[in-house]
Amino acid sequence: MDATLVQFAHVNDLLAQTSSKLAKQRILADFFRTLSEPDLRLAVRFAAGRPFASTDERTLSVGFAIFSEVAIRLLQIPPTEFYELVRAQGEVGEALSAAWPELPPPSPLHSITLKDLEIAFDDLAATGLQQSKRELLASLLSHCTLPREAAYAAKIIFGDLRTGAQQGVLQAAIALAFDKTLGQIQRCQLLVGDLDEVAVLARNNALGSATFRLFHPIQFMLATPQEDAAAAAQTLAGRPFWGEDKLDGIRAQVHKSGQRIAIYTRTMDRVDESFPDVVDTIAKLPGEFLLDGEIVPWGDGRVLPFVHLQKRLGRKSLTHAILRDNPLAYVAFDLLYLDGQLLMDEPLRKRRALLEGLEALHKTTVTTTTDAAQISAAFDLARQRRNEGIVLKDPDSIYSPGRRGQAWLKIKTHLPTLDCVVTAAEFGHGKRRNVLSDYTFAVWDRDPADPAATLVNVGKAYSGLTDAEIAHLTELFRKIAIERGGRVFPVAPQVVLEIACDQIQRSSRHASGFALRFPRIKRIRWDKLPADADQLARVRELYESSSNFAHSLTQTPEAAPEPTLFDGDC
């Protein structure tokens, strides 16, 4: 008998009820063993929160607005009631479950199956008409008899299962279900891409038949942060490592075969349509390959500040003027596959030698370092070239996808911290959905002793505080909120946070005219009053400093809007 959505929901609810990864693996393994080959494929896919296989580039194109419209109509409740449920529950699936009328359980012959769900997703992806999507969603949800069926239909649509069954747990569960090692499962997924296909191969004892395929994203190898050159030299312990500039762009993986080219980011999203100039350059190179590197703003033969790349991001259409005024380049630093040969298990020195053979491709420059003085010199040169810092790599290292070990190290410095005033607090996501954990912060536009002084926002941060500190701030911000309702609470200027960041950039998004890049909360400054917070002049001073590599003397500042106390989202 075909696996049903009710069974899938029951298994995943069990996963959510335990924090033990081993228990999650056993629950999933027991479930996977019972399934036919088609249902196994779907169960693994849906358990990962995917409506389609990871190498399938189709999308449902179903947003919160259209889904909510259909759900509200079926539930026959006021929109405000549904939106409040979503806020309280933290996600759409649980909100739907809380409001869903529980009817008598369906007979097995009339239960929604995983195959039914697959067909519904295929139909949703096949139409671009909003009315057709509404009708298809209404048909799918109206066949959900039980609240948990409706919940998991929504959870998969929005990719938000919240069961704790991340990829590692799923890989281990497949290994346990079919008596394979975790290493075998991981290796096979590296080759074929789709974990649901790996599960079927494992079930059929056919993992050894897998061969590498391009056009599915590989997890990126990561570097371990080092505090400074001395710490890095201690890690090297006299071994020669290659140093290369840590570029300030978008980490990107390029797959090419013939004229087919795909670019994937760290989030595994395909983005080649956003970078036609990069695609054009790659298309001129011969051969079939997989590169690891960075997309960077580029001009006069050098990397430009990140702000030039930022002007290209998030745009639905790229005009000739945008492409002309904000040129980009791809700078490669590793070669993982070339003309039928997988190179990840080869030492970096061999991969690099083959990479050098790809002419007309921008590449990083490497220098050999063995001690703190050489590392420090390489770092200073990288900063003079306006790059983030350096990455140190063991020339004998293999490429380890998703791993952060001692084979690659990175050093980068941060600007001095700023003391900022919280102007708004927002509910978080996941386990923080019921606490105010995301904070918009501001600096004074002039001396706060001036009666005309105003707070102008410079960013938003949500990392760096403990759960206890967030709970304390939630209670405080509820008390001092200027407005209540919705997800965002504008608050009276009372709390000061010490904020660290990697860069300061010009921005028309904030009334300050600046934005902090990668801001993090270092601590709550209970010892400071709002009047003690930094002023815009300090932000401008740091922006113009030599340590802020986002600054460019040739850059034309964007005009900032008139400042207000609460100038919107950050």
Image (cartoon, rainbow, N blue to C red):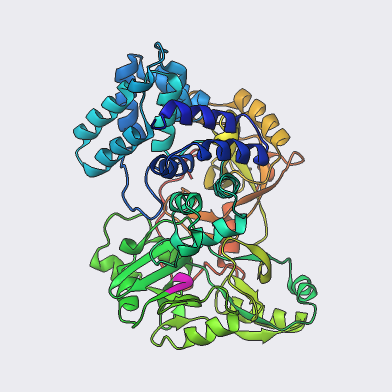
Question: Residue 1 location, x and y as percent?
Answer: 39, 30
| Residue 439 in view, yes or no | yes
The image quarter in which residue 231 lies: bottom right
* x and y, in percent, of residue 92 in the image: 44, 29
- For the point 70% across and 30% down, which residue is it? 472
Position of residue 51 in the picture relative to residue 238 (left or right)? left
**What residue is at 49 percent from the left and 38 percent from the top?**
566
Query: Residue 116's x, y, as percent?
Result: 32, 33
Say if 415 sits above or below 376 in the image: above
Stretch of the chain drawn in magenta: 290-295
Q: Which image quadrant is residue 424 in?
A: top right
Q: Is residue 147 magenta?
A: no
Residue under the image location 48 percent in, 83 percent down: 355
Secondary structure character of the magenta stretch overall: strand
295 over 41 or under it: above or below: below
Rendering coords of residue 39 (x, y %): 41, 39
Q: Nearer the viewer, residue 284 or 349?
A: 349
Can you say whether 527 is above or below 54 in the image? above
Choose between 379 and 5: the one closer to the eye: 5
Please tell me in which quadrant of the rendered image residue 477 appears: top right
- The residue closer to the viewer here, 500 or 448, is 500
Question: Can residue 486 be seen?
Answer: no
Q: Residue furthest front?
A: 205
Horizontally, is 404 left or right of 48 in the view?
right
Q: Is residue 106 above or below residue 216?
A: above
